[in-house]
Amino acid sequence: MPELPEVETVMRALTPLVLGRRITQVTLRAKGLRTPFPKGMAANLTGLTITHLSRRAKYILLHLPKNQTWLVHLGMTGTFITRGTRDPLDKHDHVVIDFDDGSRLCFNDPRRFGQMDMAHHTDLKPLAALGPEPLEATFTPFVLAQNLVNKKTTIKAALLDQQIVSGLGNIYVSEALFYARIHPQRRAGSLKQNEIKRLCATIKEVLTASIKAGGSTLKDYRHPDGNLGFFQNQFAVYGHAGQACPGCNCKLAKTGGIKRIVQSGRSSFFCATKQK
DNA sequence: CGGCAAACCTGCGAGC
DNA sequence: TGCTCGCAGGTTTGCC
């Protein structure tokens, strides 16, 4: 479900719900998600206070005393939901967290593609190989160019590779490539310097605009506080196959309009008139 | 190394 | 109404 803007939005919405609260009980209602829960996770979390929250790529980091970190990946369908302690649980509430103020938070994940880990903050294995954080100043055209050099794979696949740049997913890759006017089937290593410069900029722009809109809400996904994101209303190409592309009269041409193709099993949306 | 399909799971909408 | 099919915002593995 979530790419960087959605994870950022969830992390922000989660903050007032958990910050400074002490965990009194964690109940695991499944053996794990995509991977088994770390050994002793529930017991190890009990009694600890969440001191602050942050995000790295598509991971939410809940920081605990003694530099311990509880790492959460939402996968495709993971959500945090607040419930009253007397409310019935959903069958996909796999982790139930009770706090010292009587509040309860549930991690709900129908497809169980999410992931949790708990370790010293310097020893979080899922974070070890991640590429640059796209909204940080360290993510520059030079860095992107370095990570694309000699890559024979398509630019679409390269941008989904979390080691090249972290946090992008299927939606924002299509959107960023559209604004950068780069065809998703281009070989990554074939991009010219000015194209990489444009791409670096559009990645930052599209992610920033989405965070500002509260991320994208597809299906019934919503934030822990119940709010919805609205960036889906601003998609230029994603999910718009057959329609005219914005700011382009290509639909009037015989071969125009937004196309959908499948690349390594995943949909790409693009305008063949604008993107070369 | 590259590219692709499948695997992990469930739910939903479309079409018959 | 009920069935099957295709599709879904992620990541990893294994095969050729």
Image (spheres, coloured by chain):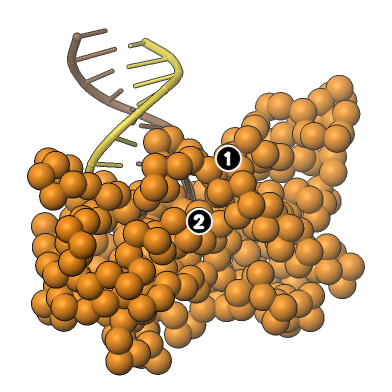
Chain colours: A orange, B yellow, C brown
The residue positioned 42% from the left and 72% from the top of the image is A53
The residue positioned 43% from the left and 35% from the top of the image is A219
Frontmost residue, A274 versus A121: A121
Query: To which residue does mark 2 refer?
Result: A9
The residue positioned 84% from the left and 39% from the top of the image is A273
- Identify which amino acid the numbered label 2 is placed on: Thr
Q: Secondary structure at mark 2?
A: helix
Q: Secondary structure at mark 1?
A: loop
Q: Say which chain tag 1 marks.
A: A
Give how far across and how far down residue A15 sits, in percent: 41, 64
Residue A66 sits in quarter: bottom left
Give how far across and how far down residue A14 sits, in percent: 39, 59
Left or right of A53 in this view: A41: left
Q: Say which chain tag 2 marks.
A: A
Q: Is residue A192 visible?
A: no
Residue A158 sits in quarter: bottom right
- Mark 2 surroundings: few (<14), some (14-19) or many (≥20) residues within 10 A: many
Q: Earlier in the sequence, mark 2 or mark 1?
A: 2
Give how far across and how far down residue A10 sits, in percent: 44, 56
The residue positioned 70% from the left and 81% from the top of the image is A138
The alpha-carbon separation of the residues under discs 2 and 1 comes to: 11 Å
Query: To which residue does mark 1 refer?
Result: A230
- Mark 1 surroundings: few (<14), some (14-19) or many (≥20) residues within 10 A: some
